[in-house]
Each structure stands twice: as structure tokens, then as C-alpha cells.
Amino acid sequence: MSRFPAGPALLPENGKHDMSGKEPQLAATVLMIRPVRFESNPMTAASNRFQGRSTATPAKQQQAALHEFDVLVDALRAADITVVVIDDTVEPHTPDSVFPNNWVSFHADGRVVLYPMEAPNRRAERRSDIIAQLDKEFGFQVSEIVDLTAHEESGHYLEGTGSMVLDRSNRIAYACLSSRTQLDPLGDFAQRMDYDVVTFDAVDGEGVPIYHTNVLMNIGEDVAVICDAAIPRDEQREAVMARLRDTGHDVVRLTYDQLDAFAGNMLELRNSQGERILAMSDQAWRSLSAEQREVFQANGRIVTSPIDNIESSSGGSVRCMLAEIHLPRV
């Protein structure tokens, strides 16, 4: 159950949102949730073949995850990224709370979107107190809560910027369809947030559907990353690649081995000095070729961090741990 009380949405004074300006693609601030009871989540195992590779006990998984979390926070802050850290709560037990980008997204017009989650124990990750803290303690302006969670009642899900990779500047949402990413909530998001949607099917090297789009692709300002081999239908693959190039992106193509190493699960940010920062795990960086590294290094500064336990236990990586905060300041 979500920890959001029922009630009316917050609306701007004129009841409308300014869509005239472009939203920047890169955020300078991210939200991260420090884990307290992290472990591989049995409720998500059926759809996430990347998880459950750790044989450690839940206590050891939590201990390692906490250390990896703090090291990543330090690495981002050393690169002049502002990191808002909120501790998870012991109860209810939310083993995947370290991945807030699945339940919430923050937008430059002041809107906050809440998403329908497939696993019942992930729905409790949605916390109204966190949004209140961003407003009252950190000075971010929240104009409206766009609540898509009613789709859970009909068994339809859309897990935030895991399910969608957003080209915010061009208002395009890329989404590979799966049990966690479905058309009804996608259409709802597109209509309410004024986005075009590019949908496609994607499978791993064994032909199993990929559960989240941000496993296989990322979009920065100038460079996009994608494992296009994971899109089996020619017409869909060509349409995705054409859209990326038409929006001015240089495209770095990943292999299946790099996909398995979470190289698709990177995120481009912008620090307080205006410098582009590309964040990814150590494993992802090690998987890249020399030529790919050169492209990324020419594009901006690289931040890597070792999160092997988080990746092997829960099947998510650095991008999943970062919820970009695009909200305006009060």
C-alpha cells in the first residue's frame, strides 16, 4: 500500500502548466534513499532475470549495500552533484527502496509523478513525507502531484524512469513493453505530461523480455546509449534508432555482454560548475571498449562506483538509484 493519503492534487494558481519552455535533459540534483533492510526481493524475481545472483544472507546484503550506497553518494558529491539523501524506514519492509526512480519522477514545471508498481511490497516505497521534505527542507517547489497509481487496481503498471527513458528536452518517452511497462498507464502519462511515446519490444540474450527500459538505454544531451540488438523486430529497432538520431544524438551501441554488465544503466547529470557528469557502476565501465570510453570521456566527466552487491542481489544499477530532481526552487 502506498504511503500517500487520498486527497486532491496540488494545482498551480491558474490551473495550467507552462509547456512553452524546454525542460533540461540533465539534472544537477538527485534523490537517493539509504537502505535499511535491503535484500533480493522475491516479489520481483519472476520479471527481473538480472537479480538473485548473490548467495549472501539478507543481513550481509544489507551491510554491503549500505557501504556501496555511501561510497556512491561520496563519489557524486565529489563531482559537485547535489545529493539529497533520505533514510528508508524499517517498517514497512521495502527491500528495493534504494531504487526511487521507479515510484517517482520530478519535473521542471513543479509536477511530481507517482507511478503504479507491479510488486505489492514496492508500493510502500511511495512516501509523501519525502516530497514534503523536498518542499519544506530543501526549497523545491511542488505545484502538483500527478498520481497514476490507480492503474494498479486494473493490473497495469508503469515503473517510472525504469519503465521509461525520458528525452525531457524533446518530450519523448522511450519504453520497452513488459509486465511492468504497459500501454494504459503509458498513454495516461503521455497525455497528462504532454509526451510522445516510442514503444518497442526488447529481449535479453536468451529471448526473455527485458523488464525495464533503462537496463538497455540511456539518453544524455548529445549522446544516447542503447543495446539495439535487444530489439528483435527490425521496424521497431529502426524506428528507435531513427528517432534518437533525428533528435541530434550520437548513438553508442552496446552488446549483450555490456547490457548484462549494466552498461545501459548509466545516467548523465550536470554539476554545479556546468560540467556534464556520466555516472555508472564500476562493472559497467569495465565492460566498455576503449572506443566507447573515448566517446564518453569527450562528452564529460566519468563517475564510477563499485556496487557489485546491489547489482547481483537486486538486478539494478547506478541509474536506478538516482531520481533526478528537476523541480524549480522556491
Image (tube, rainbow, N blue to C red):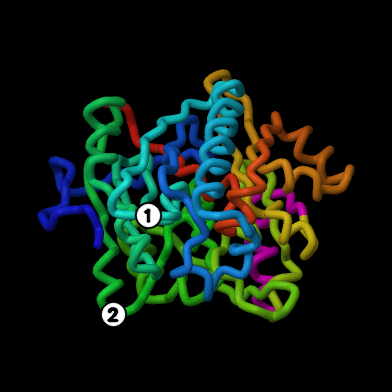
Image quarter (top left, top right, bottom left or bottom right) of the N terminus: bottom left
Q: What secondary structure prevails in the magenta region?
A: helix
The numbered dot on residue 154 is 2
Q: Is residue 23 visible?
A: no
Report if residue 244 lies within the magenta region. yes
Q: Is residue 190 left or right of residue 154?
A: right
Report if residue 154 lies within the magenta region. no
Of the residues shown, which amino acid type is indicated by label 1? Thr
Name which residue lies at 60% across and 40% down: 268
Q: Which residues make up the magenta segment? A: 234-252
Name which residue lies at 53% across and 41% down: 63
Q: Is residue 67 above or below residue 208?
A: above
The numbered dot on residue 94 is 1
Q: Is residue 197 left or right of residue 248?
A: left
The numbered dot on residue 268 is none
* Sequence order check, earlier mark of 2 and 1: 1
